[in-house]
Image: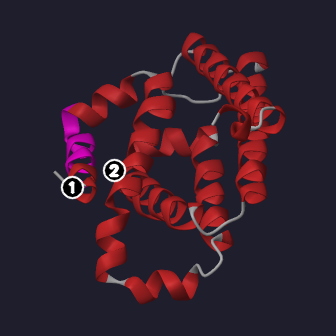
Amino acid sequence: MTQPFIGMLLFIFLIIPPIARFFESIMILHMHMQMPLFILSGFLMYPFLREKAPNFFLEWNKNGKPGLLLFLLIIVYWTIPRTMDDALQNYLVEWFKFVSLTFFAGIPLRDSWSKVPSSAKQWLFVLILVLFTVMGVLYILSPVQLCNNYLLVEQVTLGWGFITMGICIMIYLIQKWFINPGDYE
């Protein structure tokens, strides 16, 4: 099986209504499982699209920075509590979530990753670290429900999930900054 085929199967699997409802029924699964899996499906579908439309990626994402910016904007948009509520209440917004995370986040991320320098990749991790930390603190310390479709305890659990992912990113960055891989080759 090729990567694009696996990516398409993953996308189709994730949009099956019972599967989508299962992921969306628990807040942390919605944010930290379903959304990254849609990004992964786009990431895997990229080689097929690059083969079919090579000039498109060369024209709009020459140095990789527009793709990373688009990826970051989509990620920030879907961390807003109101957008998660909208995706649960309106099927058009839900479909926009599926399409935007797959085609406007996963594919541009894969296209940009090889084009940008290492410093841009590290800055992307730092920005995601800040975003996850801020959102984690917001979800944990908020005395009211931020998402009407989820309980307050699920909101706190999601906040701790954001903090945990932020800690993992911080560990990765510290390792990247202080350990030279050449010393171990």
The residue closer to the viewer here, 88 or 9, is: 9
- Estimate the x, y position of residue 27 in percent, counting from the top left: 49, 24
When the figure is inspected, residue 171 is found, relative to residue 69, above or below; the finding is above
When the figure is inspected, residue 115 is found, relative to residue 86, above or below; the finding is below
Image check: 96 left or right of 168?
Answer: left
Q: Residue 16 magenta-drawn?
A: yes
The residue closer to the viewer here, 94 or 5, is: 5
Image point 25% across, 45% down: which residue?
A: 10
- Magenta span covers which residues? 8-18
Q: Label 1: state its secondary structure.
A: loop
Residue picked out by circle 2: 91
Image check: 69 left or right of 97?
Answer: right
- Estimate the x, y position of residue 15 in percent, counting from the top left: 25, 45
Image point 67% across, 64% down: which residue?
A: 69
When the figure is inspected, residue 26 is found, relative to residue 182, above or below; the finding is above
- Estimate the x, y position of residue 109 in percent, counting from the top left: 54, 59
Residue picked out by circle 1: 2
Image check: 53 left or right of 10?
Answer: right
Report how far apart the C-alphas of labels 1 and 2 lie in the structure: 31 Å
Image check: 70 left or right of 29?
Answer: right
Image point 51% across, 65% down: which residue?
A: 108
The answer, for residue 5, to whether it is visible in the render is yes
Marks 1,2: beta carbons within 8 A: no
Q: Earlier in the sequence, mark 1 or mark 2?
A: 1
Q: How many marks?
A: 2
Tell us which disc is closer to us: 1 or 2.
1
